Image (cartoon, rainbow, N blue to C red):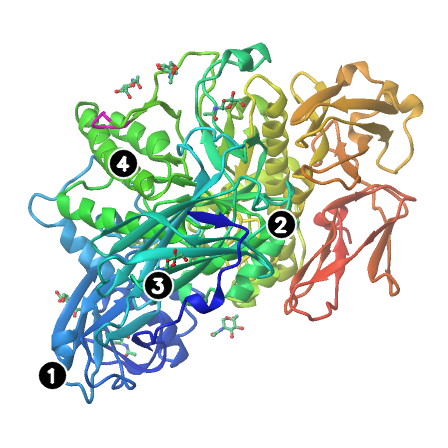
Amino acid sequence: MFLAGLLLAGGLLQLTSAQNVVDLSGTGWTLTNTQGNVTVPGSFPSLVHLDLHAAGVIPDPYNDTNEIDLRWVAWSNWTYTSKPIRGLLNHSESSWLVFDGLDTFATVQLCDQVVGTANNQFRQWQFDITEALQACINDPVVIINFSSAPATANSIASEPGQETWPDGVQGLFEFDNRWFIRKEQSDFGWDWGPAFAPAGPWQPAYLVQFKPKDGVYVLNTDIDIHREGQINHLQADQTKPWVVNASIDYLGTLPKGSSLTMDIKDSQNKSIIASGSLSGITANGNTITGITTVDADAPKIWWPTGLGEQNLYYITVNIVDINNKTLATVTKRSGFRTIILNQTNITDAQLAQGIAPGANWHFEVNGHEFYAKGSNFIPPDAFWPRVTEDRMNKLFDSIVNGNQNMLRVWSSGAYLPDFIYDIADERGVLLWSEFEFSDALYPVNKDFLDNVAAEITYQVRRLNHHPSLALWAGGNELESLELPLAAESDPDGYAKYVGEYEKLFISLILPIVYENSRSISYTPTSTGNGYTKIDFSLPVPMVERYLNITSGSYYGDSDYYNYDSSQAFNLSNYPVNRFANEFGFHSMPSVQTWQQAVADENLQFNNNVILLRNHHYPPGGLSTNTTNSAKGMGEMTTAVERYYPIPSRPDSVANFSVWCLATQRFQADMYKSEIQFYRRGSGRPERQLGSLYWQLEDIWQAPSWAGIEYDGRWKVLHYVARDIYKPVIVAPYWNSSTGDLNVTVISDLWESISGTVNLTWYNLKGELLSNNAKTPSSVPFHVGPLNITDIISTNIKDLSIPDLKDAILVLSLEASGHLPNNDTEVQFTHENFFTPVYLNEAKLVNPVLKSSYDNTNKKYVLEATKGVALYTWLDYPAGFAGYFDENSFLLIPGKPKAIGFTEMDGKSVEGVSVQTLWDQSYHE
Ligand SMILES: *[C@@H]1O[C@H](CO)[C@@H](O)[C@H](O)[C@H]1NC(C)=O
Ligand SMILES: *[C@@H]1O[C@H](CO)[C@@H](O)[C@H](O)[C@H]1NC(C)=O
Ligand SMILES: *[C@@H]1O[C@H](CO)[C@@H](O)[C@H](O)[C@H]1NC(C)=O
Ligand SMILES: *[C@@H]1O[C@H](CO)[C@@H](O)[C@H](O)[C@H]1NC(C)=O
Ligand SMILES: *[C@@H]1O[C@H](CO)[C@@H](O)[C@H](O)[C@H]1NC(C)=O
Ligand SMILES: *[C@@H]1O[C@H](CO)[C@@H](O)[C@H](O)[C@H]1NC(C)=O
Ligand SMILES: *[C@@H]1O[C@H](CO)[C@@H](O)[C@H](O)[C@H]1NC(C)=O
């Protein structure tokens, strides 16, 4: 019986003396290569590149073209050797080495005996060293040999009988054959990042020794919180009690009759909301599991940011013996929420509301639909051990302040460490999480499947307690790209490839997710048309819809890229679907970021160093031919030339800097146009409920789709996305060929809201157009929950605009209402604008900015005095970190703006500068 609200009798549970656990982290390791020309101090956890750089053997891997020059590091084998391990027991019943992660092909020796091997970066490894340790108990040394991952991948690929795929199916970036190995796939190169193929002990490790009757050592803990009766992919009954299932994987031996107890405390450690023994105890292999229920109203619910509070609880689970003696204790911070990915067929009730037939594809948190706003998260660094909590806290600051409530943690990548999920739990950022498979088909031989099964089991159990975990997806672009490529390249072999895909991503992985979680939905592919049924009696328990679709119906989510910039603002090209999980266009990072890695003399668009750092398009192997890169660079410059004034500064670094900014302006405009389009879909037949752009942040200093640069600096995109992800927005929709113009108000609030939009036409000198160009100057609106309302529907030709090249419509929204689950009344404001020509044709006027600093309020005060200032951009020099209250904004003469700066590293920013679109072209 589990008693809610009772205090645990403190004296009842006595703590045992735990096992002897020696943390192998820290210094005192030595790193050598097998060629024998390098011996340097090693740290732990670490990666070879980091230790070589720290020792001065290699330059900063991120600088210049070092990515290419350092390939010898990836082709070499490396050895980490510990100093003699101290603090061991002379007599133990058993001893183990536990590695939380080895990257990737490792042979572990103790006392010159091989004690284990590893071949998967994403698994935890335990090696029994009881016997081996006897041989050198006074001076035990651990040696870990890492063999080259690219060499190992190539050698697996050339094994007789190994699987092959038709040409053009497998996404090849730099190093080949990544699909044969369980290692971060982007380590072998991707179109936004470098290919270092690092190796090393990237996670902590421990030497664990047991005395007789010494309890157990906890390896991994699965805590699953769901509503009674809940099934992963179906709506839960929100009135039912919570079920808490705890399952602990351990080392050691449990005495017969062991069981579990639990207490659940609020995050201030003030009150215990539930405590007692778990029921239904089962012990299988090295796992003990038990279950309990918690009254429906005992805990406060966890909500994503913007939708309510992030209530968190500490859950402590004790493994106890028959006398209630504690054998092990583990505490996890968790939260109570349900989250599902709803992919069920559109119901009659939905059809009656005007929703088009087909299937749903949206998330529901605690039984509520919501609009998912966010982006795609890639590895924040090529070398994980240097990803710190401080850096991630700053990144999540930017995410939450960017009005984003969901990230897709892209495969592949690595499964994020718990501390990042902890930050997401605190900040209310949902993490749609993926297994590490991407842009390739994968082998399905038994060894590979067994290896994957162990990986998935470990990761699903490790991460399941985090309330920010929103979804598990099998892999990236598998149904939307890989299977169609296979069909095209090898029509006869297609059925085989679909069969293999289903074997791995459905028959193998789906049951593992469901066996370890009742709370998380699973989809085998990031982008697809969803499933038609789930039936565990079938050999392939999820029946995918694939192309069994009816026109006029909508299914699934979309992944859309179009590098022909002439189509960038053509709304009729954007996908109409239930959810947009990837879309974008690349841009340059700021000149400040380039200067971290590249010398000034190389800062030119066609410079070889710049070209070699741009991986869109990838070379498709280890060639240093830059033809593909030049094509990607050309897409950026063409886009700028097509729509904006062309930069041309006499000073070459200054010119490069303006060009970088210009590519960011195009990028931001294009994303804004798409996000406005997708959000409008929330009130249209497609009932579109999510927009996650590609990509949140950068892995290094290079051109990419990111909105946040490697050191945390916001590009134009992140500011613009923050603006267009506000809860209530007003947006213009223009068809540049027909002249049709609609203005729509969009709200993702959960209540109806009323307000006003002011519409004002100016010429570019900032003077009012007469009679407001036959446009109402103010329109009241009422918009329903998660809905839209069109406020203007006209054609440019029907307005009286004297000169289309000299006109701008300013849209300004005001409304008051409430955020979901919040009683405080909030003023919602949003400003947007529209010009009836692209800005390279507009008769821009020098706005002659007046700027000053308001010391009392700590704000930059900016005012345009002679003309409209477009894309007003505040910039700060290298060496500072933070973001402005607003950026890339419009200034109308006579309407000053005061803008503050949020410092992210406690250093007062100095040297802030300002420029506008007028400054993009050169004026003597
Ligand atoms: C070590 O040897 C490799 C070739 O085997 C070479 O590429 C590398 O530069 C050498 N490194 C040092 C530090 O001597
Ligand atoms: C690296 O180790 C592998 C496997 O142990 C071996 O086959 C290979 O020859 C080694 N390569 C080098 C460069 O030492
Ligand atoms: C999916 O969403 C629709 C619309 O909100 C709802 O009617 C249906 O019950 C949901 N299905 C599930 C399984 O949650
Ligand atoms: C162990 O604790 C449980 C619940 O706290 C209690 O019901 C049981 O009697 C205790 N057993 C012993 C042997 O003290
Ligand atoms: C959903 O609709 C499809 C047709 O698109 C149908 O084949 C399938 O059986 C339906 N699923 C359920 C659970 O009703
Ligand atoms: C229709 O669905 C079935 C079952 O998933 C699949 O085998 C078939 O290939 C699909 N047909 C098309 C055209 O996608
Ligand atoms: C990396 O390059 C930048 C720019 O040339 C330089 O300032 C910096 O010192 C370099 N860093 C290292 C570690 O070489």
| 38 up-or-down from 252: above or below | below
Q: Position of residue 139 (x, y in %)?
A: 20, 88
Q: Nearer the viewer, residue 663 or 230?
A: 230
Quadrant of ligand 6: it is top left
Q: Residue at x 63, y 25 (%)?
A: 680
Depth check, mark 1 against mark 3: the one in front is 3
| 2 up-or-down from 165: above or below | below
Q: Amino acid at mark 2?
A: Val
Q: Which residues are magenta?
A: 537-541
**Which residue does the numbered mark 4 point to in the structure image?**
169
> Is residue 739 found left or right of 33 in the rendered image?
right
Q: CA distance from mark 1 to mark 3?
A: 38 Å
**Which residue does the numbered mark 1 point to in the structure image?**
135
Element class at badge 4? loop
Q: Nearer the viewer, residue 230 or 750?
A: 230
Q: Amino acid at mark 3?
A: Asn
Q: Residue at x 75, y 63 (%)?
A: 912
Which mark sits nearer the N-terminus, 4 or 1? 1
| 815 up-or-down from 319: above or below | above
Q: CA distance from mark 3 to mark 4?
A: 58 Å
**Residue 19 visible from this viewpoint:** yes
Q: Is mark 3 within 8 Å of ligand 4?
A: yes
User: In the rendering, which numbered label is found on residue 400?
Assistant: 2
Q: CA distance from mark 2 to mark 1?
A: 54 Å
User: In the rendering, which numbered label is found on residue 127?
Assistant: none
Q: Residue at x 74, y 26 (%)?
A: 836
Which mark sits nearer the N-terminus, 4 or 2? 4
Q: Nearer the viewer, residue 916 or 149?
A: 149
Q: Residue at x 47, y 64 (%)?
A: 387
Q: Position of residue 887 (x, y in %)?
A: 72, 49
